[in-house]
């Protein structure tokens, strides 16, 4: 499955929001599919979503079939040390001109 650039940007913003909101972070870990849907990112009901914490790689989704089911694994990196909450908020809210370096895809 291929994800659009808009989907990748929305996912990056959702991950950035989890860095700013501990409740959202915990909810994303415990029920990622519901949080994706709340964010407007459609995931089919038959897809299991797993979040893997503290990976250093980029925000890439992987899909694997197990006995006819689909699993999306979402890496959830730690908040980059070089970014302030203000920088992250500005980008998430769309008031910044560009993506901060710590949020850019590799």
Image (cartoon, rainbow, N blue to C red):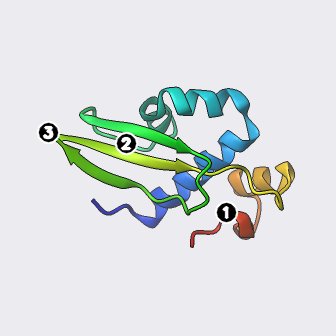
3D distance between C-alphas at marks 3 and 2: 22 Å
Residue pictured at 47% horizontal, 48% vertical? 74
| Nearer the observer, 60 or 2 | 60
**3 to 15, vertically: above or below:** below
Picture layout, residue 105 above or below residue 77: below
Q: Where residue 17 appears, x then y in whole percent? A: 67, 43
Earlier along the polypeptide chain: callout 1 or callout 3? 3
Instruction: Give x and y (percent) for residue 3.
Output: 37, 61
Please state which of residues 7 and 75 is positioned toward the viewer in this rendering. 75
Which residue is nearer to you in this view: 69 or 43?
69
Q: Residues within 10 Å of mark 3 (few under 14, many from 20)?
A: few
Instruction: Tell me the residue that label 2 is attached to.
Output: 42
In the rendered structure, find residue 67 and report the number of the disc placed on it: 3
**Residue 96's spot in the image, x, y percent?**
77, 63
| Closer mark to the observer between disc 3 and disc 2 | 3
- Horizontal and vertical percent position of residue 61: 41, 55
Q: Quadrant of the C terminus?
A: bottom right
Q: Which residue is mark 1?
A: 103
């Amino acid at each position: 499955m291929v994800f659009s650039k808009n989907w990748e940007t929305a996912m990056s913003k959702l991950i950035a929001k989890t860095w700013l909101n501990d409740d959202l972070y915990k909810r994303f870990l415990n029920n990622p599919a519901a949080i994706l849907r709340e964010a407007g990112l459609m995931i089919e009901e038959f897809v299991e979503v797993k979040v893997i914490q503290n990976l250093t790689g980029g925000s890439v989704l992987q899909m694997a079939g197990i006995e006819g089911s689909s699993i999306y694994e979402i890496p959830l990196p730690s908040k980059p040390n070089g970014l302030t909450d203000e920088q992250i908020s500005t980008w998430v809210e769309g008031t910044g001109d560009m993506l901060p370096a710590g949020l850019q895809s590799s």
